[in-house]
Image (cartoon, rainbow, N blue to C red):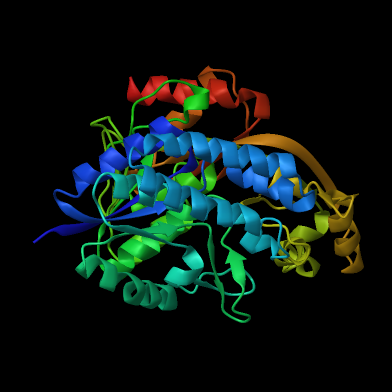
Amino acid sequence: MKGRIVSKFGGSLLRNKKSFLEVSFYITNLIQKYNVVPVVSAPKGVTNTLIKLYEERNEETILNLKNRYKEILKGISNLNIREEAFKLLNDELKRLKENITYDQFVSTGENHSGIILSHFLKNLGYNSIYIDGYKVGIIVDSKGVIKEDLSVKNVKESLEKYLNDDVIPIVGGFVGKELETGSYKLLGRNSTDVTGAIVAAAIRADYEIVKDVPGIYIVEPKYGRTKVISKLSYEEAGELTWRGIEAIHPLAIKIAKTHNIIIKVKNLKSEASTLICRETATNYRNPIAGVSARKFYLLTINDELMNTPEGRGYLTSVTEILSSNGVDVYDVATSANEISITISPKHMFISKRRVELILKENLEKKGYKPNVKGKNVGALSVTGEFLKHNTTVLEHLIMVLGKNNIEILMIAKSSSSSNLIFIIKVGKLKKAINAIYKEFFR
């Protein structure tokens, strides 16, 4: 009896005739061992095109998409199948002139990928059908929260009939059905990983995320050439992706952990890959799984009232003020009269006012006398399960950074975390990452 596998393909693998052919042949090879459910993003660059097109309808842009797809469809040798695909794509492009919602409009790119890929597979002799995330049963509420259990139940009911009849169902990512209104609802950028995880949970399948890189690197490629990580625990992968490595959506990892699904991150050709599962490859000798980096904005609040009876609940007041203004807090460090907090640089300004000023004014209303400063910083995240227990690694990392003249502005770590955060000057990120890689991995 065949196993089942969900294969998620991003837009970088769905860009032209050659890449659609490569993905099609890859799927047909999998079919020898598995019942396959491909999950697709929009063709490379199409989502951004659709966002602009929604704001300003442009016949030339639609014509360019039509010509691009006509060129891709030349990879289908059977003229009848090619013409059927082009008719369906043309119908989709006509809908871009209709009065449909933003979410439905922008998510049509996934439909384009699904229609093209299903007809490439038909051309190779396989029965295939495309279903978007809305119709397959992904449910999301008005706040954008995916209703996981209901989605899993719906997707299982939608797909089982096709799998039992040897039909390859291709599922579109990026969109679902809003619980309250029944309308199309976007799941957010890079969310096709999440759709894939829900599909894998629903049909109890293996899950692979196929990319244009052979796995998750120890260090992000933009900071230097490093090895692919062979294995990450769910917690390690969650920390790395939340902190800056964009290899996989953090929510996909959470869903996979809940349903005990092993995720394989790989490309079409390489033997290398990264497994994400319950186990870690770290140990006392090799305690670090990976290193990620991200730019943050560091808020420092000084107030002599902190270390007094009047200052009780000061940190709570700070986080509540930020939260009420839509600002997420990433890291916190405290001392007697100082609180340091990292936030996203996009929240430096709130309604065109500096966040420092908003924080200061609201704290003063509570009777405090804060001095609030902010600056751009770099956050270096060092991740590994064994960091929970191995305290000597922190000392070693501090020594390495010091030896390379990298000033540490703040350190954050909870007792149960597999993550160490070093806040440093933003211009020192690359130097710090390379120093740590050289010390621990070479």
Q: Quadrant of residue 142?
A: bottom right
In percent of width and height, residue 312 lies at 73, 68
Farthest residue in the bottom direction? Answer: 180
Q: Residue at 87% across / 56% down in the picture?
A: 358
Q: Is residue 399 above or below residue 353?
A: above
Q: Is residue 202 above or below residue 373?
A: below
In percent of width and height, residue 116 lies at 43, 47
Q: Is residue 20 visible?
A: yes
In percent of width and height, residue 98 lies at 71, 62
Q: Residue at 59% across / 18% down in the picture?
A: 405
Total marks drawn?
0
Farthest residue in the left direction? Answer: 1
Quick one: 206 or 68, which is closer to the camera?
A: 68
Quick one: 250 or 39, which is closer to the camera?
A: 39
Q: Is residue 417 visible?
A: no
**Quadrant assignment for the C terminus:** top left
**Quadrant assignment for the N terminus:** bottom left
Q: Report the side of 238 relative to 214 (left or right).
A: right
Quick one: 133 or 361, which is closer to the camera?
A: 133
Q: Residue at 40% across / 56% down in the picture?
A: 253
In percent of width and height, residue 132 lies at 47, 63
Q: Residue at 69% across / 49% down in the picture?
A: 51
Quick one: 326 or 162, which is closer to the camera?
A: 162
Q: Report the side of 86 relative to 357 (left or right).
A: left
